[in-house]
Image (tube, coloured by chain):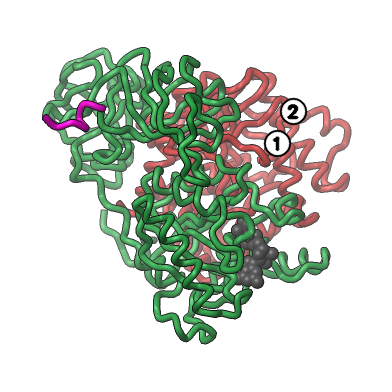
Amino acid sequence: MATDIATPRASSNIVIVGHVDHGKSTLVGRLFYDTDSLPEGRYAAVARVCEETGKPFEFAFLLDALEEERDQGITIDTARARFHTARRDYVLIDAPGHKEFLKNMVSGAAAADAALLLIDAAEGVQEQSRRHGYLLHLLGIRQVVVVINKMDLVGYRQRAFADVRRAYLDFLAALGVHPQAVVPVSAREGDNIAAASARMPWYDGPTVVEALDAFAARPSREHLPLRFPVQDVYKFDHRRIIAGRVEAGAIAEGDTILFTPSGHRGVVKSIERWHPSRTGPARAGESIGITLTEQLFIERGEVISHLADAPRAGAELRANLFWLGDRHLAPGRPYVLKLATQEVPCAAAGVSGVINTATLEHVAAHEVAKNEVATVTLALKTPVAYDCFTDIVETGRFVLVDGYDVAGGGIVLPPVEDDYTI
Amino acid sequence: MEHLDALENQSIYILREAYKKFKKLAMLWSIGKDSTVLLWLARKAFFGHCPIPLVHIDTSYKIPAMIAFRDQLAREWSLRLIVGQNTAALADGMGPERGRLTCCTALKTEGLQLLMAERGFTGLILGIRRDEEGTRAKERYFSPRDKHFEWNYKDQPPELWDQFKTDFDADTHIRIHPLLHWTEIDVWEYIRREAIPIIDLYFAKDGERYRSLGCWPCTGRVKSNAATVEEIIAELRATNTSERAGRAQDHEDTYAMQKLRAKGYM
Ligand SMILES: Nc1nc2c(ncn2[C@@H]2O[C@H](COP(=O)(O)OP(=O)(O)O)[C@@H](O)[C@H]2O)c(=O)[nH]1
Ligand SMILES: [Mg+2]
């Protein structure tokens, strides 16, 4: 289908993370205000609330919409809002910085293409600054800009900026994270947000808006090997349709395909769409259906690939895992692993390298507590199809469900034998 | 991938997850543009069929044209339509003069609650969007409600990598929001692209149109000359006013929507 100039552009998801009170919500509010992205009346409504409660104007309230959030000046849950610069459309994800709400921060960060890591110039690097930096890295977010906020509190001095900058860059470097820019700002006063600040003439790097626009667009997954997890099988009419979303690569009529882990093979008879905006092969990101030339018994969970470049299959996974559950992750306890559309009971067979994400210290433990990270080996009840996270992201990550709730997430590492080349 | 395609593919994925995971599933159809787009997306997800029953909560204060449009589309698209009404509250004289928030809670929230209990639905699909207002901006795609229908916005489950909350206690139900990531303008762009039939109350007559549809006593028209989808899109590009500006219940007090939604309002 032809696109015209009025068609909205693809948007980029940016998460704003950092320690509580360092000014994340204020920065997001400011970005909206300075780029004219606020609906009419929103500014006035916040001004009224602040006046009624005798507070100075809070940009943070533009995002912190809940009464409890405003009363306590704390973001409880992630808010997402659309905004745009001259160059691109964005979804800004304002994440909470409070340790208690880490699961909400992770929910926001997991959806991001890039991140702004915010630090208070006066307070410097704090517990959540480190923890968030670590988690972003684990979640696979490689595009990062550090924003050093509240420069007004340190007299806009270059020296104060340089000290915080060095301390945080040292920490991030130890994780292998290399920010694209470090921007000194005052979110409250609007320095270096959308326009360069006259109060920091010593700084000649990008403003926050320029730094956002410099992030690379999300890479296309079309050139990767085909991964098409079966979501469901429908028989609403004469067709028996295998439905799902192409997570990587592309699939076309006539392709010979392999189902993992069952090992079935088939040939694609048709690509099914209703009222389609396009026809032909289905590419990464498309939710479509296929029919086969011969009927097979296929169930949700199987991952379709081409014969070459199939995913791995196995009943044991080695992974880097972060834990959000109140109950510790402990060897032997039953969990359910959800990877793509597969769901399999599992247990942790081995736990090693438990790390306190605030200090990066190793914890000598065989259980993983809330907010900790570890390397685990999972023993699965039945084999699953998977990839290493570094090869194909969508089939290289999973969550663990404890009871009714998602309690942790992980990224798949290469099997241990791959580490040793003979 | 083009923007509208990306939105559409994500919504289809969510609808299919909901259909797979909930045996007792329903979709709320308010007859407005969002839930009508949602219905269209369901037909995309299920290849021209809508295997999920639609629920309409009739407060008795709906604009008559909405009911006519509903019944016509239901016939043409062979939809399974379930109409719910809090008849006890209506018999007792419930109406907006008793207080807007009281009325919304009784006729909409409780009307829905009664119907859900009667039919035993455990999953309910709704067409809310994050850009509508502040508390919706914090919603999850799969969002649990407890047995009192309450939303615990202070302690929401994690949601990452499209792994949704589909395991839950017997007493609770899950709200599913496949349009959460769309904006008002996205919805209209999509209506244009797909040529989706939309109730004509949205199109201007005599210099006024509805931008958001609800009950007639509490929904106002906005000044507008936009009489086609094309003109509505042009108008939205030029305006900054929020969509729900014409919905009186939102403006009763600063946290009106939070209070309504915490109690199970859509
Ligand atoms: N002086 C000063 N205060 C700021 C600045 N940015 C934010 N604040 C204040 O810091 C407090 C916490 O901000 P908030 O955005 O809620 O922090 P968050 O917890 O990181 O979201 C609020 O009182 C803000 O007004 C700034 O640039 N300078
Ligand atoms: Mg905040």
* Left or right: where B125 falls relative to A7: right
Q: Chain of mark 1?
A: B
Q: Which chain is green?
A: A
Would you say the residues marked 2 and 1 are in contact, meaning their CB atoms lie under 8 Å apart?
yes
* Depth check, front residue: B101 or A48: A48
Instruction: Give the residue drawn at x 41%, y 66%.
Output: A212
Instruction: Give the residue drawn at x 76%, y 36%.
Output: B107
Residue A10 sits in quarter:
bottom left
Residue A123 sits in quarter:
bottom right
Residue B148 is marked as 2
Evaluate whether residue A97 shows in this view: yes
A418 inside magenta stretch: yes
Mark 2–mark 1 Cα distance, whole angstroms, equals: 8 Å
Residue carrying label 1 = B264
Looking at the rendered structure, whether the residues under marks 2 and 1 are on a common chain is answered as: yes
Where is residue A214 shown, x and y percent of the image?
35, 67
Mark 1 residue element = loop
The kind of residue on which mark 2 rests is His
